[in-house]
């Protein structure tokens, strides 16, 4: 078994290039660095450094340990962050990371419900789109992530995460109010092959490309923005149309635009994600319950 302090010191010696430079960075004396490296070599059972003039060079064993040291320290950092997260959760503080339309619809109502029933639970809100938000959860940077997936895309969810389904979000086509198809009750995607399009975040853009390809055309994308207000404003001015989830229309219904369901019907799946071991923590369970209750009654306008 290696002493984690010795691994950290070894990593800094390798990075800095000498015992002296590592001592300055770590705030140790040079003899202390030397003693730690000797102790590590005893644990390993072989020399890790050889003297070259006034400097040092890694032995073959040192090179091997150096490659492992980065992985070891990264794993230790991730573990520490997750332990810190657990401590914070037990104290009743939960960090929720959500994509913008969930932040504007599901999250506020859920937090109002939670505050009324459990005022001692504090919740912090972070905003991020998937898949980055799922990575933040794995790294311990948040405690619950609200994310979405599209059926036609292959999205890998890390094995250590538990998915809690929240809702199926109908996709609509957003048209200027005076568009020739605006009077229809629904619109076939193939009818929009000659339109100019406004695309959203990377995952939404990928889905737009996929669904249009399924209908035999490539969309002419004029603008790309993940700001839902900007999307609706561009559509209102006749600069393009957009494929937009009905959830967005709960809070942004521009008077000069109209949303119509797409044919064939298309939906995205919205879910909450959490580390498996956090499910047993009361504060996490309370936040998840509030999110599930609100999502069950959420529809587009």
Image (spheres, rainbow, N blue to C red):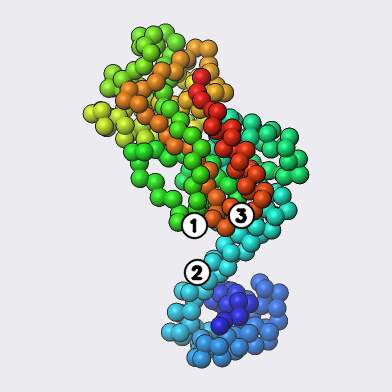
Residue corresponding to mark 3 = 280
Residue corresponding to mark 1 = 160
201 vs 88, left or right, is left
In the structure shown, which secondary structural element does the residue marked by tag 2 occupy? helix
Indicate the position of residue 120 as horizontal and vertical percent values.
76, 44
Indicate the position of residue 2 as horizontal and vertical percent values.
57, 81
Rendered view: 196 above or below 124: above
**Which quarter of the rendered picture does the N terminus lie within?**
bottom right
Residue drawn at x 52%, y 74% is: 69
Indicate the position of residue 210 as horizontal and vertical percent values.
31, 35
Residue drawn at x 50%, y 51% is: 162
In the structure shown, which secondary structural element does the residue marked by tag 3 occupy? helix
Badge number at residue 25: none
Residue corresponding to mark 2 = 71
- The alpha-carbon separation of the residues under discs 3 and 1 comes to 15 Å
Q: Name the mark nearer the viewer: 2 or 3.
A: 3
**Residue 248 seen in the current view:** no
Asked which quadrant contains residue 96, the reply is top right
Disc 3 crowd, CA 10 A, few/some/many (<14, 14-19, 20+): few
Rendered view: 12 above or below 137: below
Q: Earlier in the sequence, mark 1 or mark 2?
A: 2
Disc 1 crowd, CA 10 A, few/some/many (<14, 14-19, 20+): few
Outermost residue on the left side: it is 216
Q: Earlier in the sequence, mark 2 or mark 3?
A: 2
Residue drawn at x 45%, y 84% is: 61
In the structure shown, which secondary structural element does the residue marked by tag 1 occupy? loop
């Amino acid at each position: 078994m290696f002493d984690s302090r010795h691994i950290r010191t070894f990593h800094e010696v390798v990075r800095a290039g000498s015992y002296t430079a590592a001592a300055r960075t770590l705030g140790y004396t040079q003899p202390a660095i030397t003693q730690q490296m000797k102790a590590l070599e005893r644990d390993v059972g072989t020399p890790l450094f050889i003297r070259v003039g006034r400097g040092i060079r890694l032995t073959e064993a040192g090179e091997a340990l150096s490659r492992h040291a980065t992985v070891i320290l990264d794993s230790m950092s991730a573990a520490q962050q997750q332990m810190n997260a657990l401590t914070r959760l037990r104290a009743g503080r939960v960090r929720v990371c959500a994509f913008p339309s969930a932040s504007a619809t599901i999250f506020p109502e859920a937090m109002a419900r939670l505050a009324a029933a459990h005022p001692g639970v504090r919740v912090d809100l972070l905003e991020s789109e998937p898949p980055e938000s799922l990575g933040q959860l794995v790294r311990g940077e948040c405690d619950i992530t609200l994310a979405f997936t599209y059926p036609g895309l292959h999205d890998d969810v890390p094995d250590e995460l538990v998915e809690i389904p929240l809702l199926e979000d109908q996709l609509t086509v957003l048209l200027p109010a005076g568009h020739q198809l605006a009077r229809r009750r629904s619109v076939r995607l193939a009818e929009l092959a000659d339109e100019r399009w406004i695309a959203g975040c990377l995952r939404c853009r990928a889905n737009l490309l996929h669904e249009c390809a399924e209908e035999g055309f490539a969309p002419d994308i004029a603008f790309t923005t993940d700001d839902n207000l900007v999307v609706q404003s561009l559509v209102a001015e006749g600069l393009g149309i957009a494929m937009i989830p009905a959830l967005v229309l709960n809070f942004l219904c521009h008077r000069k635009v109209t949303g119509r369901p797409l044919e064939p019907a298309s939906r995205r799946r919205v879910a909450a994600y959490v580390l498996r071991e956090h499910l047993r923590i009361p504060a996490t369970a309370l936040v998840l319950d509030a999110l599930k209750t609100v999502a069950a009654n959420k529809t587009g306008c």
